[in-house]
Amino acid sequence: MNQQDWKRISESRRLIFMSGVAVTTLLGVLLFADLLWRVPYNNAKWVLLAIFAILFANLSFGFVQAVAGFVCLLKRTDQLKISALDKLYDGQPLTSRTALLFPIYNEDPQSVAANIATTYEALTKAGVIENFEFFMLSDTTASNNWIEEESAWLETVQKLNAHGKIFYRKRRDNLNQKSGNVADFLRRWGKPYDFFICYDADSLMTADTLIRMTRIMEHTPDLGILQSMPRLCNAKSLFARLQQFGNRLQGMIGGAGLNFWQQSEGNYWGHNAIIRTDAFTRYCNLPELPGARPLGGRVMSHDFVEAALMRKAGLQVWLAYDFEGTYEEMPPSIIDFAVRDRRWSQGNLQHTWIMLFGRIPMVNRVHMLNGIMSYISGPLWLIFLVLTTLIFYSWENSQLTMFINESWLPLTPESTSTQGLIVFLLTMALILVPKVFPLVLFLKSPEERRKFGGMARAAASLLFEVTMFTIIAPSLMLFHSSFIAALFMGQRVSWNSQRRGGDGISWREAFAVQGPCTLIGVMWGLLAWHIAPSLFWWMSPVLFGWVLAPFITVWTSRESVGDWIANRGLLLSPEDIAPPAEVQTLRDKLAIAPRLPKPIPELADDYGLIRVIVDPYLNALHQQFLRERDHQPDDIRDDLAALRQRLLSEGAPALSADDKLRLLYDLPSVSLLHQELWDAPTEKIASWWRLALSRYNRESMFRVDLQTPAA
């Protein structure tokens, strides 16, 4: 197929898709508008109609996209996908250099090291390791994590004999968070690399997928970004398993539908994508948004904007939706999921500036609008429920007899209750019908249904997942509503590391965060019942979700509950039944990853500092990563000398966190502290240091053997 034919078919697809969205939206809006007309309008109903139109259009978009993906997979004849190019170049050797970037921010260093080691070994086995180099790019602010990162890096390099292939870099100023970390690397060291692949701390890609994506980039010079579609894996808690099952079951259909209409004008999701280095460095510098933070200033969610800038420069952005072997993990609980969404909500609302006023392609505006809608839908649904409650209250207290107008639509029922039920069922159909599409595909593919434990288990898991998220959705609605309200009141969101495991949410934390949710559910339920029992029952799914929110949060955060469900054959995904080699290797590595003994409470906050100053191997290693300055002003040198003296004479608790970081960043101070501590008479150092040295000498609690021979 030549370029002109491909462009013609692509435009036809987009026209068909958008027409389907428009027709579906028009049908729902007309039915609801007619219903409101039949029980005469007032100002509140006009607002209600406008909100319904926005929300129904959003649902229609997702529904038509799912239908398009379902048809493509059912016919199995979709040739307009990037993976078709892979078959043309299959088997050809790689000729490029690709940097694999692992930006980390206060993450578990052993998990990141295990991920790097897994990928390194897989690429070595595939015979292409010479085409790839690895970079741990640290923005970590916690000194304990920082020092452990250095240890994990050295241990990984030695075990793999990967000197000159795996690198570690620590930024002192984490300007612009992850996007700034990546941009800083590309400016300083990116030029030798044809492509780069950015990872998240919890993402993984198989060697086969890395090779296939790199090969396509080599043979497609106008391809700027090739985004894979990560599958969720390694879920343990019930909440994470629900997300993993839903993502795995619906993901292929969603990806095929997304590819159907976006084609070469795809999006970037910030990780698990291969990017053309020169084009990204040249064209994807992030703009400064007008106004002050939180909605102005520096771009927080960089990926959508970078994809738009790449498209603006004339390069293609594709989604490799049918490539397997690309993974990420999910937050383990509803609260952790909401914490991440709060950060993303600010980033997506910032895109409003670019969507409305930026000189970017129209399809990228649609991507940004979808991202914005994913967060403002919650507040809009909440306003919809508030208005519905007020309208019911106003009518019930009017003491008037309802006068029903005749419908101005043909074939509508005489009863307004029946018409309201039709609108409700149509809305629910847009949400629920796509859920069944994978089961229909399973009828044609015994191999696919076996990946989910068989048809019966897949169907039972689907029913359970839909039920659980019907209960969870009202909580997320309130979370998103509170996030949006906070943003408009000027509250900024900080960029914190994500909790990726643990023993679940405690009852104290659940009620502290979601106790107001329960209170809202109880109070609104009593009000609804007082207004009209019919209103209460109509709202009951939402009300029950609010009332039960803390209990559902605690229950779904438990790994024991997730294991109990999985042991009965529910919520299984292909990675649970037959995990790929890299996934299993990573699990095995994490199971045996070395962990430092838990320090005693008096030393826990500063064990990284202790290890660097006490241990000669770690002290020498840490110095290798520090910059040697030609000249240091006298006042700074004197200030650092005073801090060193105070640290030795009073102990680490006497210094602020910033002061301790200043010492750890200063090469002369790190060297002198090690010498002065070991040279000083015992009575000249703080009792805190005597405790640290006694624990070090007696139990080797803080010592890591860095002299392990290379594997």
Image: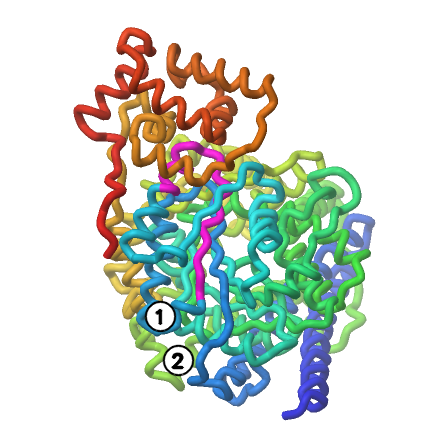
- Viewer-closest of 27 and 124: 124
User: Where residue 402 sits: x, y (%)?
Assistant: 75, 54
Q: Residue at x 27, y 24 (%)?
A: 600
Q: Residue at x 29, y 20 (%)?
A: 678
Residue that badge 2 annotates: 442
Mark before the other along the chain sequence, 2 or 1: 2
Q: Amino acid at mark 1?
A: Ala
Q: Visible in this render: residue 422?
A: no
The residue segment tinted magenta is 132-150
Q: Is residue 348 magenta?
A: no
User: Where residue 549 sits: x, y (%)?
Assistant: 46, 42
Q: Visible in this render: residue 155?
A: yes
Residue that badge 1 annotates: 458
Q: Amino acid at mark 2?
A: Phe
> Under tag 2, what secondary structure?
helix
Quarter of the picture containing the N terminus is bottom right
Task: Classify 374 as above or below 689.
Answer: below
> Under tag 1, what secondary structure?
helix
